[in-house]
Image: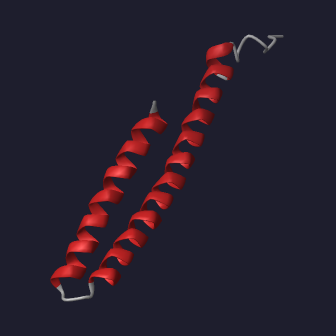
Amino acid sequence: MISVTWKIISFVLALVLFCVVGARGIFTGDELIWSVLRAIGAFVVCWFTLGQLGNLLVFVVGRQEMVGTSGKDAGGEAGMEKD
């Protein structure tokens, strides 16, 4: 669930960045081809970077869930013997 949500968020943020960079290039008087290429480059870099951060987030959450189920909740104290 987290990975799907993160992919949607990263796509929307990358799309917004695409629009902002493209509009900035057009309004500052750059040639259209360079504005589009910069916007596409910004989109790809942003989406890739946020995708990697999302993978890291899913990895960390998955490890916390594994520790939570195999740690104290799964009888961590049951293995200790009292003298």
Q: Residue furthest left?
A: 27
36 left or right of 41 in image: left
Coordinates of residue 58 in the picture (x, y in percent): 54, 40
The residue positioned 43% from the left and 44% from the top of the image is 7
Q: Residue 32: which quarter of the image?
A: bottom left
Q: Quadrant of the C terminus?
A: top right
Question: In the displayed structure, would residue 79 be above or below residue 24?
Answer: above
Judge from the rendering whether residue 77 lies leftward or rightward of residue 2; answer left or right. right
Question: What's the residue at 58%, 28% (across, down)?
Answer: 65
Residue 79 appears at what percent x and percent y? 79, 13
Instruction: State which quadrant residue 38 falls in.
Output: bottom left
**Residue 81 in the image, given as x and y percentages of width and height:** 81, 11
4, 32: nearer the viewer: 32
In this view, 64 is above or below 45:
above
Viewer-nearest residue: 82 or 49: 49
Looking at the image, which residue is at 46% across and 30% down? 1
Q: What colour scheme was applied to this rendering of the protein?
A: secondary structure
Query: Quarter of the image holding residue 42?
Result: bottom left
Above or below 46: residue 33: below
Residue located farthest toward the front when viewing the structure as drawn: 33
Q: Residue at x 35, y 59 (%)?
A: 14
- Return the x and y of residue 41 as percentages of the image width and height: 43, 72
Residue 1 vs 31, above or below: the answer is above
Left or right: 57 in relation to 28: right
Count of marks placed on residues: 0
